[in-house]
Amino acid sequence: MATIDGLPPLREVIRAHDLVAKKQLGQNFLLDLNLTAKIARSAGDLSGADVLEVGPGPGGLTRGLLAEGARHVVAVEKDPRALPALAQIAQACPGRLTVLQGDALELDVSAHLTPPVKVVANLPYNVGTELLIRWLTPGTWPPFWQSLTLMFQKEVAERIVAQPRGDHYGRLALLAQWRCEPRIVMHLPPEAFTPAPKVHSAVVHLTRLEAPRYPAPEKILGRITAMAFNQRRKMLRSSLKALGRDIEARLERVGIPPTARAEEIGLEAFCALARSFE
Ligand code: SAM
């Protein structure tokens, strides 16, 4: 039986299993095992943790996670063509890799995971933001995961860590920063992937906070930020008009100038505004 280091190179695996990349599945593979090990390390110490990986493909990152000592990796892959390659890895690491075939947007993986759980994934770009939003908005907080280490296109990564007045600042920054500490830990050029995508990529590491950074009712905060950023160039007294005739006074009460625009207002002030509706 091969050990993880004795497995064939990924190019060979792809050839042997005819894993020609499919665009509709967002397949841009990482074939450099030094790079996948580096991404695995950016998730922190994996030795005592279960790892949820979405979209393992031929298994480059999966190998990195196992080699870095993950206790157990649960990998969800939509493409059945990848299963034989992943089975080879499972064989090399008995009992440490569970592969589930299906759509990560539909499968409930909770029964397969034991806390602490870290999510690490080179996500398919077409489902990445949706998965992130789901992980950030579970029914109860703290969520099932301790941290998320995720590949995104660079522009999405910048939206996650953006600060007020920046071009990328918006609802995703507020949502991510309300309950997590997000930071960009790696930048990757298109050539790092096979085939090379058109865009640059970045890995974002989000560590969950045990409680939101500032208290606020979640639904109201979501509604306010949606209204504010749907018309981001308008003054708040106008974009939030539907929240009541007293909106101007309310904004002033929580220290927000009614003539300010959404992109100028920080998370703390949005939370204070949301609390004023409680
Ligand atoms: N992790 C591999 C790597 O780093 O080389 C592959 C990454 S590739 C960008 C995205 C992977 O996600 C592909 O293997 C694709 O088949 C898989 N995928 C796409 N949509 C998916 C979904 N809805 N659920 C689970 N896997 C999906």
Image (tube, rainbow, N blue to C red):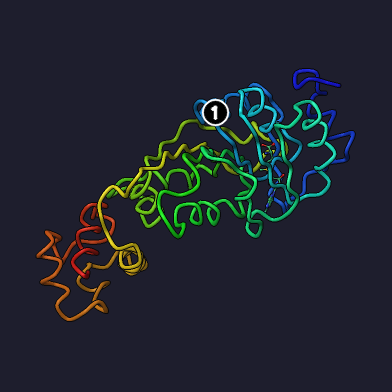
The vertical placement of 162 against 47, above or below, is below
- Position of the N terminus, as image quadrant, is top right
168 or 150: nearer the viewer: 150
The vertical placement of 43 against 246, above or below, is above
Q: Position of residue 203 (x, y in %)?
A: 52, 36
Please name the residue that numbered disc 1 is placed on: 48
Is residue 119 toward the left or the right of residue 162 in the image? right
Q: Element at badge 1?
A: loop
Q: Position of residue 233 (x, y in %)?
A: 29, 64
Is residue 256 toward the left or the right of residue 217 in the image? left
Q: Position of residue 121 (x, y in %)?
A: 60, 40
Classed neighbour count for the residue bearing mark 1: other residues with Cα under 10 Å, few (<14), some (14–19), many (≥20): few
> Which quarter of the figure has residue 258?
bottom left
Type of the residue with mark 1: Gly
Is residue 258 toward the left or the right of residue 266 in the image? left
What residue is rendered at 22% in x and 52% in y? 268
The vertical placement of 251 against 107, above or below, is below
> Does label 1 point to a residue whose CB lies under 8 Å from ligand 1?
no
- Position of the C terminus, as image quadrant, is bottom left
Q: Position of residue 67 (x, y in %)?
A: 66, 23
201 or 142: nearer the viewer: 142
What residue is rendered at 51% in x and 28% in y? 42
The residue at the far bottom in this view is: 245
Query: Total label count?
Result: 1
